[in-house]
């Protein structure tokens, strides 16, 4: 049995008694933001006098940035600026979840607020109608850091039966995955699907298609919902790109990309043009495809376990060992989308989508546009 948190063992029937109480016309709004690590999420809740009808009805708030690796104690107040609102699947209607941007004392974006620069690029390429779909892989762990359901001493059977597997000996943690899926649907997150992955206790969900800035917004909220659902079960979800060393698959966040011209008749030529541009900026993309400038992806992009080498750029039809995969159907129909397989599971979707949109659609490239 995996180690679970003590709070998950509390009596949920008692909790339900309080969840069914009337709120007296008030509304609870949970503010969500990315902290100074660029990977972890924080949240806190306040009361509004009535249910907000749009994001404009939710006021700015503040928090102690010195406790989230985002400010010093002598100047710790930081602003929370609501940008995207969702239904709350934990407290239920009329309560809301709201994703926020973080601004510093001078109203400039915090260092890990990459949404601001991403939106500038997405606004510039608006006419291209760029769509994204991101495939978020994650691994379930006990609170002791050991993969959920793995033997306490030793390893499970080798990879092979787990990918899209079914049965108690193949699929570990399906309850969590299905609860997360339902929570996303209730919230209004554009979740597309889910499946068990190649390594046991590893899963994936897909978000999209989303246009422009919406991709990052929906993936970050989907991640929040994942961590929050896992909290109820006493289990931890990690986005580590290589949670277990050895002959085990890593975890990525494959990013599917399509512009209006790529989706139209003869769009394959625009897909090929985009891939050529991506190849010329391979190293720059690697530095923004994980939070540590490529150091996390070094452990994952080895050229093995369905990855390309971090040092090489390649593309191919139906090739999961390439940097960029063109799906077989796209190759046959000569239009559609391509898949960038390089982003790590713990990537910031704002920096990934910004880089791709900039490189593929703006002559100045990602580096200049991000400033």
Image (cartoon, helix red, strand yellow):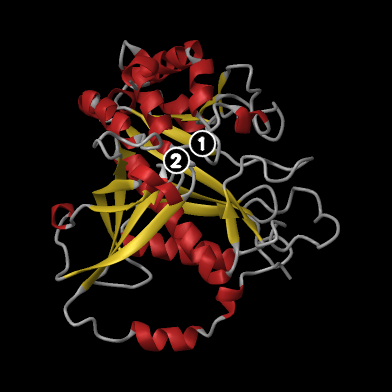
- Give the SS element for disc 1: strand
* Marker disc for residue 128: none
Q: Is residue 320 visible?
A: no
Q: Which quadrant, please, contains the N terminus? A: bottom right
The tag earlier along the polypeptide, 2 or 1, is 2
Q: Are marks 2 and 1 in contact (CB under 8 Å)?
A: yes
Please tell me which residue is depicted at 69% across the width and 68% down the height of the picture.
Answer: 3
* Marker disc for residue 134: 2
Badge 2 density bin: few <14, some 14–19, many ≥20, Cα 10 Å: many
Q: In terms of image quadrants, where is residue 302? A: top right
Please tell me which residue is depicted at 34% across the width and 65% down the height of the picture.
Answer: 186
Q: In terms of image quadrants, where is residue 359? A: top left
Give the vertical position of 272 relative to 303 (above or below): above
Q: Is residue 2 visible?
A: yes
Q: Nearer the viewer, residue 185 or 139?
A: 139
The x and y percentages for residue 313 are: 58, 17
The x and y percentages for residue 27 are: 22, 71
Q: Nearer the viewer, residue 300 or 196?
A: 300
Farthest right residue in view: 154
Badge 1 density bin: few <14, some 14–19, many ≥20, Cα 10 Å: many
Give the vertical position of 305 relative to 79 (above or below): above
- Give the SS element for disc 2: strand
Using residue 5 as the reference point, say whether residue 94 is left or right of it. left
Q: Nearer the viewer, residue 367 or 358?
A: 367
Check disc 1 and report the residue beneath it: 254
How many dots with numbers?
Answer: 2
Marks 2 and 1, how far apart at CA: 6 Å
């Amino acid at each position: 049995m995996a180690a679970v948190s003590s709070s998950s063992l509390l009596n949920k029937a008692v909790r339900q008694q309080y969840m069914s109480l009337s709120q007296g016309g008030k509304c609870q709004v949970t503010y969500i933001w990315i902290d100074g690590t660029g990977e972890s999420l924080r949240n806190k809740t306040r009361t509004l006098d009535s249910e907000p009808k749009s994001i404009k009805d939710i006021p700015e708030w503040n928090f102690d940035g010195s406790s989230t690796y985002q400010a010093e104690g002598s100047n710790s107040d930081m602003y929370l600026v609501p940008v995207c609102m969702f239904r709350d699947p934990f407290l239920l209607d009329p309560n809301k979840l709201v994703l926020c941007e973080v601004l510093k004392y001078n109203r400039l974006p915090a260092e890990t607020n990459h949404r601001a620069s991403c939106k500038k690029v997405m606004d510039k390429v608006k006419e291209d109608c760029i769509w994204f779909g991101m495939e978020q892989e994650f691994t379930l762990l006990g609170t002791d850091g050991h993969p959920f359901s793995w033997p306490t001493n030793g390893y499970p059977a080798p990879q092979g039966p787990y990918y899209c597997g079914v049965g108690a000996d193949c699929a570990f943690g399906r309850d969590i995955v299905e609860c997360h899926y339902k929570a996303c649907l209730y919230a209004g997150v554009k979740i597309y699907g889910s499946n068990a992955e190649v390594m046991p206790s590893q899963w994936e969900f897909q978000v999209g298609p989303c246009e422009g800035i919406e991709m990052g917004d929906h993936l970050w909220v989907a991640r929040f919902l994942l961590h929050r659902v896992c909290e109820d079960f006493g289990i931890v979800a990690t986005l580590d790109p290589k949670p277990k060393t050895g002959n085990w698959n890593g975890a990525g966040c494959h990013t599917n990309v399509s512009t209006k011209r790529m989706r139209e008749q003869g769009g394959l030529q625009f897909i090929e043009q985009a891939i050529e541009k991506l190849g010329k900026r391979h190293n720059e993309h690697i530095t923004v495809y994980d939070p540590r400038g490529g150091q996390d992806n070094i452990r994952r992009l080895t050229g093995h376990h369905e990855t390309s080498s971090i040092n090489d750029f390649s593309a191919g039809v139906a090739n999961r060992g390439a940097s960029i995969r063109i799906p077989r159907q796209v190759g046959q129909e000569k239009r559609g989308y391509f898949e960038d397989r390089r982003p790590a599971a713990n990537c910031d979707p704002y920096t990934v989508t910004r880089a791709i949109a900039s490189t593929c659609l703006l002559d100045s490239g990602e580096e200049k546009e991000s400033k």
